[in-house]
Amino acid sequence: MSYMKGRQKQTRPSLAAQKQGISMITLDPIVQHNAMIFKEVRLRALQDSPSAFGSTYAKESPLTDADWIERAAKWNGEKSAGYLAMDKEMPCGIVAGFLDQEDVTRAHLISMWVAPTHRRLGVGRLLVDAIISWARTKRCGTVQLMVTCNNDVAIRFYQDLGFAMTGRTEPYPNDPALIEYEMSRPT
Ligand SMILES: CC(C)(COP(=O)(O)OP(=O)(O)OC[C@H]1O[C@@H](n2cnc3c(N)ncnc32)[C@H](O)[C@@H]1OP(=O)(O)O)[C@@H](O)C(=O)NCCC(=O)NCCS
């Protein structure tokens, strides 16, 4: 028994060792040539966390490959940036940022998701940092987002990354029992 415990201690990577693995994660801009990976990750995110997003798997799964290629181009235009987190060849996260259509000093962070296998390793932080950096290059002073009121983990995550509730709320489109909180932070 004690031998097994000893073995477990030796074989299970420590949290520090797991977090060192984060240095192996790369962020790939979403572009037309990785549109099928984008499709796969986005559909996984919608299935894994159905109440975290404004859209749904039912709405996006019928999109054609041509739609995803067009979408990939839109997610990396003059007014937008999208990133896939890659653990070598394995996609493990996604995020996008868009400039506000009326006020270009504001950017919106959307579609934030990290694969369950890669959570609490700093991948989410890397993805948010990428959008903050992009927003700075666009001279945005503020990055804002909407988070569903029952998504305690995401609210805590964003708070720990410097976002605060603005006080503005909206109805959550997929469930009338829920609302979304707006959060923002300076860049
Ligand atoms: C929210 C989410 C993106 C966080 O991604 P992640 O890669 O696990 O986050 P990180 O490892 O970068 O965490 C950064 C910090 O956020 C906080 N945090 C993240 N997850 C947390 C949790 N489950 N409980 C408490 N704090 C948490 C911690 O302060 C953490 O730093 P630490 O690990 O050094 O303590 C991820 O849980 C997810 O994809 N959830 C489902 C989809 C979703 O809700 N998206 C948001 C839509 S608005």
Image (tube, grey):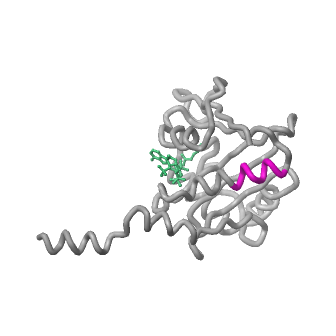
Left or right: 38 in relation to 141: left
Q: Nearer the viewer, residue 104 or 75?
A: 104
Q: Which residues are magenta?
A: 130-137
Q: Residue at x 67, y 53 (%)?
A: 129
Q: From the viewer's perspective, tell me whether residue 70 is left or right of residue 157.
A: right
- Answer above or below: position of 78 versus 87: above
Which quadrant holds residue 37? Answer: bottom right
Q: Residue at x 55, y 42 (%)?
A: 160
Q: Is residue 20 shown above or below 105?
A: below
Q: How many marks?
A: 0
Q: Could you tell me residue 145's position as x and y percent?
A: 67, 39
Please provide percent x and percent y for residue 146: 64, 36
Residue 41: which quarter of the image? bottom right
Relative to 45, does residue 177 appear above or below in the rendering? above
Where, quadrant-wise, is the N terminus in this rendering?
bottom left
Task: Identify which residue is drawn at 37% across, 65% down.
Answer: 14
Residue 151 x %, y %: 50, 38
Along the line of sight, the residue nearer the viewer: 145 or 18 = 18
Quadrant the C terminus occupies: top right
Q: Is residue 136 magenta?
A: yes
Residue lying at the far front of the rendered structure:
16
Residue 20, given in percent of the width and then of the height, sits at 50, 67
Residue located 54% across and 38% down the image:
155
Between residue 58 and residue 132, name the one nearer to us: 132
The secondary structure making up most of the magenta span is helix
Using the rendered view, name the quadrant where residue 170 is placed: top right
